[in-house]
Amino acid sequence: MSLLLEACALRHVYADGSIGLDDCTLAIRPGSRNALLGSNGSGKTTLLQHFNALLRPTDGQVRFAGQPVDYGRAGLNALRHQVGLVFQNPDRQLFSASVIEDVSFGPLNLGLDEATVRQRVGQALAAVGMTDLADKPVHHLSFGQKKRVCIAGVLAMQPELLLLDEPMAGMNVEEKQDMCRFILDVNDEFGTTIVLIEHDMGVVMDIS
């Protein structure tokens, strides 16, 4: 089976000279569910941000669908339509007034027609259980609901690869269970490849 994503001997040195990654190699199969584990400061988030080219390697290479990542504007736009990243803190990602406006932002920027945008947004909101809150102001949502909206916004872009940076952080037990079910559903129903950062081995076992 061909690989969807490859990190090939990645090294990343930050502007202050600190090393974020050093000779990191990883291969992700299409349709798989994957968890990145490690202590704080081990480079998990740094690696995730290389996967959608928020960061560029100092040395080494990232390959998507067999091709080296193109860091030109057109190449980055194409990659980020296929690789969606959900940050740990949802407030870094939400900027529209209402839930439906936020989830619609990405598909509208793809230049899709109104009917297609409505369909994608409806499917994404249903997938994360937020259909009934579509018109609610974002600032009135709970932390867990905000995370769901962020994920819906990425899902509406219909990426091949969904990157989740500690999606369970700040959630209670019930919210974690719901998130695990959501991750399994997205992987099973849409075939979306999943890579998430997680510290809780119980969660990792639940989605394995």
Image (spheres, rainbow, N blue to C red):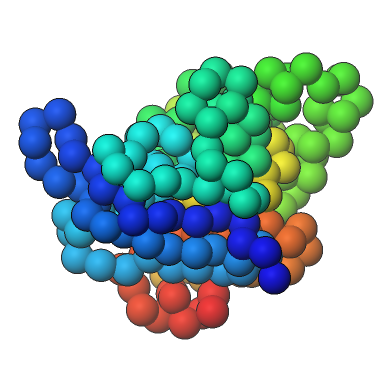
Instruction: From the viewer's perspective, tell me whether residue 69 is left or right of residue 58.
Output: right
Q: Nearer the viewer, residue 12 or 200?
A: 12
Instruction: From the viewer's perspective, tell me whether residue 96 is left or right of residue 61.
Output: right
Locate the C terminus by quadrant: bottom right
With respect to residue 96, does 38 lie above or below? Answer: below
With respect to residue 152, does 26 lie above or below? Answer: below
At horizontal 79% and vertical 37% (from top left) the residue drawn is 120
- Image position, residue 175 (x, y; %): 48, 62
At horizontal 54% and vertical 75% (from top left) the residue drawn is 207
- Image position, residue 142 (x, y; %): 45, 43
Which residue ends up furthest to the left in the rendered image?
17
With respect to residue 148, does 178 lie above or below? Answer: below
At horizontal 79% and vertical 45% (from top left) the residue drawn is 123
The image quarter in which residue 193 lies: bottom right
Regarding residue 48, the answer to whether it shows in the image is yes
Instruction: From the viewer's perspective, tell me whether residue 12 is left or right of residue 139.
Output: left
Q: Nearer the viewer, residue 190 or 124?
A: 190
Which residue ends up furthest to the right in the rendered image?
115
With respect to residue 186, does 18 lie above or below? Answer: above
Q: Nearer the viewer, residue 100 or 13?
A: 13
Instruction: From the viewer's perspective, tell me whether residue 93 is left or right of residue 84.
Output: left
Q: Nearer the viewer, residue 43 or 6?
A: 6
At horizontal 69% and vertical 18% (from top left) the residue drawn is 109
Please give the count of numbered marks on the rendered protein: 0
- Image position, residue 61 (x, y; %): 42, 46
Regarding residue 151, the answer to whether it shows in the image is no
Locate the N terminus by quadrant: bottom right
The image quarter in which residue 113 lies: top right
